[in-house]
Image: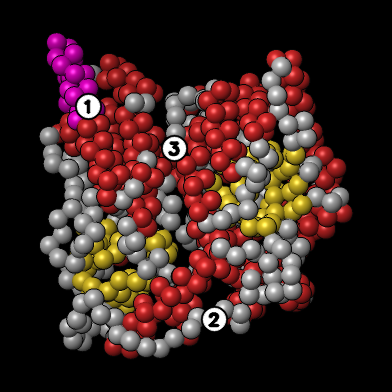
Amino acid sequence: MRRTLSLYAERVTRGAWLQPIDMEPGDKTEIVVQGVAASQGIAYGQVFVYLQSELELPAYQVEPEKRIDEVARFDRALVVTRQQISKIKNEVEKNIGPEEAAIFDAHLMVLEDEALIGETIREFEASGRNIETCFHQVSSRYVQAFSEIDDEYLRERAGDLRDVAQRVLQNLLGQAENSLSRLADQRIVVGRDITPSESATLDRTAALALVMDSGSRTSHAVIVARSMKIPAVVGMRNLTERVRNGDWAIVDGYDGLVILNPSESTLFRYGKIQEQKKTFEARLMESNRQPAVTLDGVTVSLMANIEKAEDVAKAKAYVADGIGLYRTEFLYMSSAHFPTEQEQYLTYKSVVEAMAPLPVVIRTLDIGGDKPMAGKTELFPKENNPFMGFRAIRFCLEHQDIFKDQLRAILRASHHGKVRLMYPMISGAEELARANVVLAECRAELQARGVPFDDKLEVGVMIEIPSAAATADLLAPDCAFFSVGTNDLIQYMLAIDRVNDRIAHLYEPTHPAILRMLRQVVTEGHRRTLSVSVCGEIAGDPIFAPLLLGLGIDCLSMSPAWLPAVKYMVRSMTMADARALAAEALSMSSPKEIYGRCDAFFRARVRME
């Protein structure tokens, strides 16, 4: 359902031919394959199928007198890998930018991970098997743990770990590293799963687009592609098995399409889209510099979701009204140890000061269950249903020493700007009360230490469990605000695993049950004069934004790059029309009909010419 304004140019325009490469005539039938739009843009050219070969690992016992040499061989491989990644990082910083180069800091941290390296050595000492086998076994466990995480961003970090592990194994085996730095000619690169370091070596003059069978919008390979202004589509499943080198294709990075053997009419249509997109995107950015005010004078708050402190620059660049969701898991997931109170304080303080005087909503730790932490497996036992397991506030209330470190750090950061604290995965009033008791203890501890903090720090909850939404009236007296996490709320309400490809099509944000639940949360929140925001993915979709605002949502928080499209929509509508849309949607029974009505509302107010 995730779309951007620019993709609608395809529906309403007719015009010029695509020009980058002359189309050779052929009799092949046009085939349209749907994937996930990851990096905007349109490319047309011939395909290069990039298939990474699987490493064949030897397995043997190492003689006792050679075991010291085997460990030394492992150390040398780690050093060489570190040198390779540092070189890639330096090249990316020089050719693309420091923000993109920072991606490889996480790769370097893997090579310093005492848990990963220590477990490998212990496995080797216990089994006596060659170090490649031991390292592969241990790293595979880590990759599997990250792959099972529900959060898309954190799940994609499995790709980073897999990338580093592959390099270490290549160096242990004396094999050359894979590279996309020398494409023979301009090509659309199609691969199963292109690693961050492989994407970083892309020849920008030759790579027309990036297409992957797997991956997501948050993978580091995609982040690199976006930075290079290279169109990308992911989630194509088995496209590598359906195409051959030299096939002609269009890659539509707006709508997530790959069109094989495009017809003359398709080339003509996409030529016009390509002509118009730069003009339209310039219009979006111009709109983004204006206030988010509807045509009938209602000001709307549009905020940004961030994962780490470095994301603040994007939030400011896209003129966010503040940080509506700061996911703090990254601090924990990128390290083998729990960050100290001081480490967290300095990180939160940097975000708060950078955004001041705008507000920053810091969500407390949402880890555990589906988000295990490397090196702390004893705290995160395997669960049959991790999405509903021992995670988030449940984990924090069970491990109050960890929870208190974070709460004290957030309180201390509140002295430097406008901070709001938010608990995730609250299921009811009793759980909220328990969390607030711990917070009160932290306040008292800081006061005893003479450490300043904001006495009026606002505390709110994520409404992402149906029980919390149903008892919003019971939660409201102890809250200053509600923030609806629609990603999980929709998943739990409809019993849909949104990362399961077989049933993902049933994940419907416009389901009547979802709209009624949102209206109930807004009603109960406003009754207590609480602000109600939405920080899930639909908040950043300009098709859904009018519906959410019409239901009474006060603030929309989204990935920074989505702000221009949503602000453009806000400035193109009246709040009165949005309320009428919501009223109409609430009277309808079909999710598809409701979506169609929202789509029509959107298209009636967007000028593509």
Q: Which residue is disc 3 drawn over?
A: 145
Q: Residues within 10 Å of mark 1 (few under 14, many from 20)?
A: some
Asked where in the image residue 491 lies, by quadrant, the reply is: bottom right
Tag 3 secondary structure: helix
Query: Extreme top residue here?
Result: 65
Q: Earlier in the sequence, mark 2 or mark 3?
A: 3
Residue bounds of the magenta highlight: 58-80
Q: Is residue 374 visible?
A: yes
At x 18%, y 24%, the residue is: 76
- Check residue 79 in the rendering and tell me which mark sits there, or answer none: 1
Against 430, residue 282 (above or below) is below
> In the shown orientation, is residue 236 left or right of residue 370?
left
In space, the residues marked 1 and 2 are separated at their CA atoms by: 55 Å
Amino acid identity at mark 2: Arg
At x 39%, y 45%, the residue is: 99
Against 159, residue 393 (above or below) is above
Q: Which residue is disc 2 drawn over?
A: 607
Q: Are marks 3 and 1 in contact (CB under 8 Å)?
A: no
Residues 362 and 371: in front is: 362
Amino acid identity at mark 3: Ala
